[in-house]
Image: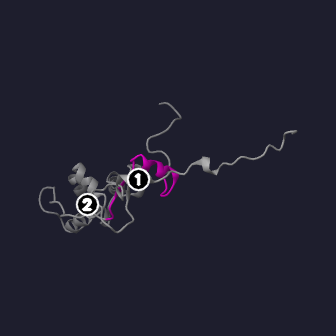
Amino acid sequence: MPSGGSRIGAGRPPQEGSLAEAIRLESGLIRTLPKERTGPTPKWPLRGRARAGEAALWAEMWRKPQAIVWEEEGNHHQVAMHVRTHIEAEAVGATAALRGLLLRQQSDLLLTRAALLKAGFRISTSSTPNPAGTPVGGPTQAKRKTIPSARGRLRAVEDVGSDS
């Protein structure tokens, strides 16, 4: 295996308001999701009825902003399995392996902030819903935003070492 070089997912995610985030916004690499998904909760996809506690958690999960992405990608079964794992992991005597699985599922479903940012999503801070999940204010606002430049901070200084 080669050493050195960049690794997929290596490093910290860009901070809000940073130059890296501004560049990603400008180029359309970051998609802003509304604070909450609106619309009906999908039908429970697993065989049989939802167990005790699963129905409430299922409905709660589908109000999250990430649910817009899950719906677009058809991740209903993955979300249902996460709900089931979540309920089982909360039980007394749950194994470390089950709780580790829960953490991996949270990352895969973009439920952690780091996973959300690395996947190119962020959650809107405004209270107005944005059902399409496009950049807030539309694509024209993202284009109008200026990226700070180092050139604006540079200035010429006189040459103090010259003989003239």
Q: Please, what is the three-letter code of the amino acid marked with disc 2?
A: Val
Q: Distance between the residues labelled 2 and 1?
A: 36 Å
102 magenta-colored: no
Q: Residues within 10 Å of mark 1 (few under 14, many from 20)?
A: some
Q: Where is residue 159 in the image (x, y as percent from the top left)?
A: 80, 43
In front of the other: 19 or 149 = 149
Q: Where is residue 10 in the image (x, y as percent from the top left)?
A: 48, 45
* Residue stretch rendered in magenta on the structure: 14-35
Residue at 49% of width from left, 56% of height from top? 15
Q: Earlier in the sequence, mark 2 or mark 1?
A: 2
In the displayed image of the protein, which residue is found farthest to the front? 164
Residue at 22% of width from left, 69% of height from top? 56
Identify the image quadrant of residue 32: bottom left
Residue indicated by mark 1 = 142
- Inspect this view and state whether residue 128 appears: yes
* Numbered tag placed on residue 96 in the rendering: none
Q: Which numbered disc, 2 or 1, marks the residue closer to the eye?
A: 1
Identify the image quadrant of residue 95: bottom left
In front of the other: 142 or 116 = 142
Residue at 19% of width from left, 63% of height from top? 41
Vertical side of 35 occupied by 119: above or below: above
Q: How crowded is mark 2: few (under 14 residues within 10 Å), some or many (20 or more)?
A: many
22 magenta-colored: yes
Residue indicated by mark 2 = 83
